[in-house]
Amino acid sequence: MSANTGFQDRQLTCVECGQQFVFTAGEQEFFRDQGLTDDPQRCPPCRRARKEIRADAQTQRDTEQESDEQAKRTPSQKLRDAPQHDSQTRGTQKQGSEVQHERGWNTE
């Protein structure tokens, strides 16, 4: 038992892998300080694995959303946003809207 906190280490069983793990007094104090009222359901290795899976899934969703947004853009929007090289100033890139304006194209 921790003298300062009133917490003591407890054995819990992971719902993911079935292994027992220790929920330490320090972890219990941290949970309390963070306003967490439930005990952890997973052991630290399973928590890490679950967190990685969720992060990978979020990255996949973000990538798909970005692809969907790009697919919805019209050809004129793509042209306007594409970098264009100015042949007079070699290597200098201009945004598509700048080139369209210089050439008198309607950008609306």
Image (cartoon, rainbow, N blue to C red):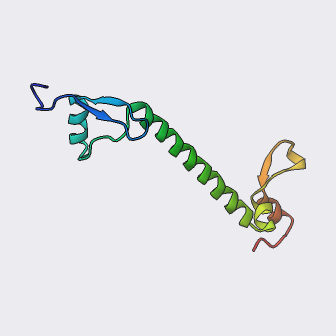
Judging depth in this view, the residue of 105 and 41 nearest the camera is 41
Locate residue 54, reporting x and y percent.
Answer: 51, 45
**Between 60 and 43, the one nearer to me in the picture:** 43
Q: Can the viewer see residue 22 in this picture?
A: yes
Give the residue displayed 38% in from the left and 41% down from the top: 15
Query: Can residue 97 be seen at all in this image of the molecule?
Result: no
Q: Quadrant of the C terminus?
A: bottom right
The x, y position of residue 2, in whole percent, is 13, 25
Drawn side of residue 14 relative to residue 37, left or right: right
For the N terminus, which image quadrant?
top left
The number of callouts visible is: 0
**Residue 80 position by quadrant:** bottom right
Q: Residue furthest right?
A: 87
Which image quadrant for residue 5? top left
What residue is shown at x 64% (from left), y 51% (from top)?
63
Question: Residue 85's x, y, as percent?
Answer: 85, 49
Q: Residue at x 87, y 65 (%)?
A: 103
Q: Quadrant of residue 31?
A: top left
- Looking at the image, which residue is at 29% across and 34% down? 12
